Amino acid sequence: MALPLFLLMFGIASVSMMVPALHALVLDDESTARAFFYAGLLGIIAFVLIAVAHAGRKPRHGALGPLMSLFAAFVTLPVMLALPFLEALPSTRFVNVYFEMTSALTTTGATMFSDPERLNDTLHLWRAQVGWMGGMLMWVAASAILAPLHLGGFEVTAQAEPGRRDTGQGARSVAADPRARLLRVCRALVPIYVGLTLLLWLLLMAGGDRPLVAICHAMSVLATSGISPVGGVQNAGIGTSGEAVMLLFMLFALSRLTFSKDTVTATQGGLRNDPEFRIGLFIVVAVPLVLFLRHFLGAFGVDEGDNLAKAFYALWGAVFTVMSFLTTTGFVSEHWAAAQDWSGLATPGLILMGLALIGGGVATTAGGVKLLRVFALYFNGAREMERLVHPHSVSGAGAAGRRLQSNGAFIAWIFFMLFALSLAGITLLLTLAGTSFDQALVLSVASLSTTGPLVDYASDTPIRLIELSLAAKAILSGAMVLGRLETLAIIALLTPDLWRS
């Protein structure tokens, strides 16, 4: 039976509620177990009834359907996901829970409940699970939905305009049966995603983490959601070894070549010559060294320059935190504060905001502008500088440059300007909704880059989201969806050619 993509996502979400229901039942929390079980059961019944009513209908294929289903999932699915959460926590309002589920599904990870003790273990598991499913959705959607339309970063490499279908043989087969492509991508990527999550969970438990905390952190690292049941990695007590394991798994958010070669971003040369991966590693090495040098010079002012132990922890804290925010995960090392204790200098939150804006790799769970677009702008800038010195020079593209189309830098610049305009517009709307300018800027960057933990570390004082006005919460919910799908995808939904098809 060929069912609509959105209906399939609704059914999967309904079945997934049985996991927290079973978890609450094991913990003897009957009220929470009933909330998730009944909500999941009603969702499954609704799914079956709609599927039966849809039987016999000829599905309409085309470019618009899957993209519209993806947009609808991020906007409407949080309503269904919020129902058991609200039933298990009746002391809050629906708008807060809807924001929480939208934040989790878009892998943003911003939370209304800054005090982890307000939520029970099952609700923490549900937040992490929704974020994990949102990450898996983006893994699949990148190859099955965004790549054929040259969106989500593929517009820099594809030989077509953003929002238009490929005209090659592969694209014709996708247009004929897009569900076949979705099924093929799911078969290839879902086992990898699940396997990596289970492996990280086992490694974190071997390092001494509690099973619940370990599985939540494992799901959050793979989905780059930054959701934690204990308020962050710094409160888990896993030590440097546990953070090192998490850092290795964050590498999957730097480039899609780390786990798949199913998209046009995969070209000759492999991971070693992948510009996204190389730029990401350069940032992870260069930025911590600059931060360490700053703290090292400050440490001499307080006679701590010869304390090698504090120096090592300060350097490691910077490496882990830079990698985490570059991949838009948002976890902070437990040694991040050690650098401040060592030198007496605070780390500017603007650095973390800049890292989140750069973001991770194309077709990964990371948000932000994406490293491939940054590479396109850098490559074009370097070429223009060369032409200033040698105006009549002829330059070969090279192995890395062949990944970009001739006007890839122009399209990357257009996206960057759209991103900047979106950032300015959301900041303006938040200030009109009663938020101070400093907080509005941090919130805008956090939502558009899908890096929720910025609200705790990028400002002088943590921002309490639950204290924001209703209008501000609605604006941020829309901004998170915009940041997850990106501006070009939203514009593509308004393209008349797609509606005619």
Image (cartoon, grey):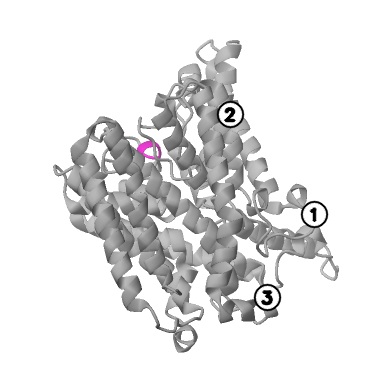
Residue placed under numbered mark 2 in the picture: 244
Query: Magenta span covers which residues?
Result: 455-459
For residue 193, side relative to residue 260 (left or right): left
Amino acid type indicated by mark 1: Gly
* Dot 3 or dot 1, earlier in sequence: 3
* Residue positioned 35% across, 62% down in the render: 10
Q: Secondary structure at mark 2?
A: helix
* Residue positioned 27% across, 65% down in the render: 46
* Residue positioned 36% across, 54% down in the render: 15
Task: Kindly indicate whether the residue at mark 1 contacts the one at mark 2 (C-beta within 8 angstroms).
Answer: no
Instruction: Look at the picture and state if 36 lies above or below 63.
Output: above
- How far apart in space, not on screen, are marks 2 and 1 (Cα)? 27 Å
* Location of the N terminus (image quadrant): bottom left
Task: State the residue in front, 151 or 368.
Answer: 151
Q: Can you tell which mark lies on residue 159?
A: 3
For residue 280, side relative to residue 430 (left or right): right
* Dot 2 or dot 1, earlier in sequence: 2
Task: Kindly indicate whether the residue at mark 1 contacts the one at mark 3 (C-beta within 8 angstroms).
Answer: no
| Pointer 2 local density, CA inside 10 Å: few below 14, some 14–19, many at least 20 | some
